[in-house]
């Protein structure tokens, strides 16, 4: 079950991250700074079915398993820490 962070509703925003990844932490901080509502998973801390379900969703958007991956409204994915792209997608 993803962790929810409250903020402005910009549609469905989900971050797939690793707890040990500095770029994942930077991406999470940016989302918090932008004040948008989002859900996130530290995939490496999940176990069993939760982890396999998260990896299944991630694989649809990032076949090579890039972290971080942000999925926006199940229509757009941003792979890696791409600050400009993230701002453009969520500030508009």
Image (cartoon, helix red, strand yellow):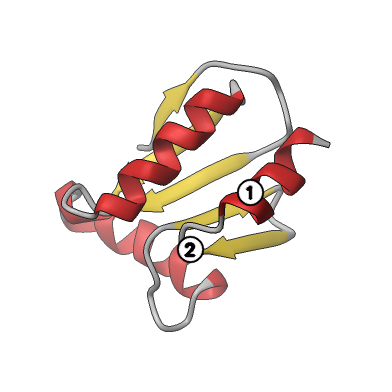
For the point 70% across and 60% down, the residue is 76
Please tell me which residue is depicted at 60% across the width and 27% down the height of the picture: 34
The residue that disc 2 covers is 57
Q: Is residue 46 left or right of residue 59?
A: left
The x, y position of residue 21, in whole percent, is 23, 55
Quadrant housing residue 52:
bottom left
Does residue 37 appear anywhere in the picture? Answer: no
Work out whether 51 lies above or below 1.
below
Identified at 36% across, 65% down, the residue is: 55
Q: Position of residue 60 (x, y in %)?
A: 54, 73
Picture layout, residue 20 above or below residue 61 = above
Which of the numbered marks, if any, corresponds to residue 67? Answer: none
Query: Tag 1 or tag 2, which sits nearer the N-term?
Result: 2
Q: Furthest-bottom residue in view?
A: 64
Query: Which residue position is annotated with label 1?
Result: 86
Depth order, front residue of 91/61? 91
- Count residues near mark 1 (Cα–Cα under 10 Å), then give few for <14, some for 14-19, many for 20+: many
Disc 2 and disc 1: Cα gap in Å? 20 Å
Label 2 vs label 1, nearer the camera: 1
Screen quadrant of the C terminus: top right
């Amino acid at each position: 079950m993803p962790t929810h962070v409250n903020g402005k509703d910009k549609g469905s925003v989900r971050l797939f991250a690793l707890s040990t990844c500095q770029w994942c932490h930077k991406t999470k901080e940016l989302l918090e700074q932008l004040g948008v509502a989002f859900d996130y998973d530290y995939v490496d801390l999940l176990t069993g079915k939760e982890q396999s379900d998260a990896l299944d969703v991630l694989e649809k958007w990032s076949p090579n398993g890039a972290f971080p991956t942000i999925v926006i409204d199940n229509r757009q994915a941003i792979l890696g820490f791409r600050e400009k792209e993230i701002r453009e997608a969520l500030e508009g």
